[in-house]
Amino acid sequence: MIKRSIGIDIDANEIRAVQMARTGNRFHVEKTFQEKLSPKTDQPSDMLHSLIQKHGFHRRATTAVSLSGPAVFFHITNPADTDFNDKTAPQNTVPDDCFPMAASQVIVAQSSASDLYNKKISLITAVLEKSLDQNITLLKNAHLQCDFADARVFALNTAVNFHQPQFARDPGIILYAGNTHTIAAVIHNQTVIGARNIPHPKTASQPDQNTASLEPSVLLKETELTWRSVFHQKIPEKIPVVLAGRCSSQPEIQNTFDEKLHCHISHYDASRKIKYTKTKDMNSFFCIAEGLALHALAPQNTTGPNFIKTRKQKNAPDFNWKKHLYLTTSLLLLIGFMWLGGLITRKNTLENKYAKMKNDINSMCRAVLPDQQNLIDELALAQLDSHLQSTAQNYTLLASCTNRNTTPLELLRLIWDHTPNQIQVQIDNMWFATDANSIHLEAHCDSFSVPDQWRTILIKAPQFNNVEIKNRQRQSDKTVFFAMDISLVNRY
């Protein structure tokens, strides 16, 4: 099954997009789009609309969009200080000195902590909610459903880690130069722990836009500042550095970093794990769009937060356990009452049917045999016995709630049924235990052998568990007095 995703990277003056497909473990870039954006003449919504209408992008593919650099802010902190993803904490509890705007205007997410140099480090990312709404509206007007929104630095890190999984298990640096900003990111364990969006200087030909590239020496200083903001020390030698975007096409940047830092420099290579339909379209400027597309196709490689989901969690109401407990209890009680009402209705129906049947039988018997009153009684008794048996079968579900102990009359009948006529025994007294599971009786007979004979017969009965003879003695009238304890099995 083919699964598709579209990654859209909206820069200040350029839009880049890729449509990526996944079949099993194979990733394939089917389409690419890259167009300059003039603030005065071009509308981003028109360009995005042309993705489907003109360039053949799939309308129903999962879509992820980047958030531009000026709308994203970073703050490095100790993760033990504040957890912005904790639902139990008050919402928007952003320290006043973290970001240059009110907490109500941003959506805050905290990355996983990294333990390095005996210090726990975590990156807090804030995104202007207004900018997020603008990008979602742009895609909606272009008939694209926005499912993911991520900062460009996290999409860049996702793409680099996807192609180079061995990168940045130790601390490393990723540098990406776009048209107006350069992203400098410090990575550890494939997680962004420090980042900066560095604006480019303005040119004389375009004083309203930051289109000039950073000088290699300036980029080196900015990179050192980014590293120091995380670790408060110089960049060590032989640190791994990945260059992407314009940085990968400027040899002087590599020479400067190699000369000053003696670091291991590599260039972003999209051909390692992803195949392009048109090889000529493959360049490192699409790395952010690739990282966005991987949000849906390879979520296990995604390192950044989805700010659309983060906002939903932020605005979601707290779960009211007490309210749901009341509702559940009320529902269970309602079900119980309905079940009990059904049983009562069924019982009344059976009783009415029995009464009607009994009246019909009595009327018929009186009409056919008016002189046979005994026959009428026997028929009524048989009908009653049949009804009782039927009722017992219909109410087996309530058997555990009723008293099923054997009555004293039933116990007396059990004893007489297991007393043959040839055994001459006269019972004087008989006591039944309250649980009807044991009997104590006193009796007399003609000889000492009679109690043993009687015990032999009683013990063979399946209803009796144990029979014990006690206090056997001969009386003055030459009769033998004895006592007997009988215990019944539990089911009786």
Image (cartoon, grey):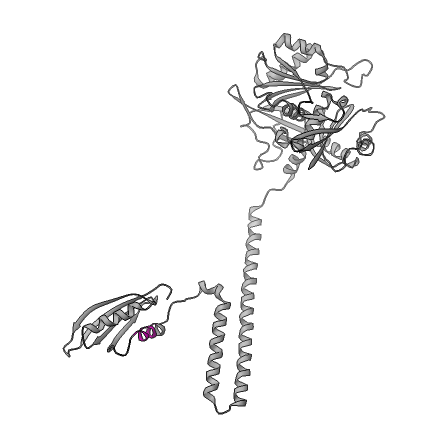
In the displayed structure, 263 sits above or below 345; it is above
In this view, the residue in front, 261 or 119, is: 261
- The picture places residue 73, in percent across and down from the top left corner, at 66, 25
Numbered-mark total: 0
Q: Quadrant of residue 318?
A: top right
- In the rendered structure, the answer to whether residue 388 lies left or right of residue 465 reads right
Which residue occupies the foreground of this view, 154 or 68? 154
Which image quadrant: the N terminus? top right
Residue 195 highlighted magenta (yes or no): no
Q: As rendered, which of 311 and 61 lies closer to the eye? A: 61
Residue with the most extreme right position:
41
Dominant secondary structure (helix, strand or loop) of the stretch shown in magenta: helix
Q: Quadrant of residue 274?
A: top right
Q: Quadrant of the C terminus?
A: bottom left
- Splitting the image into 4 quarters, where does residue 292 fall? top right
Q: Residue furthest top?
A: 259
Q: Position of residue 317 (x, y in %)?
A: 62, 42
65 shown above or below 469: above
Whether residue 103 is visible to the viewer of this picture, yes or no, is: no
Q: Is residue 50 left or right of residue 476?
A: right
Q: Which residues are magenta?
A: 411-418
Residue 194 visible to an observer of this rendering: yes
- Residue 430, given in percent of the width and then of the height, sits at 28, 73
Query: Which residue is at the front of the view, 308 or 346?
Result: 346
At x 62%, y 30%, the residue is 109
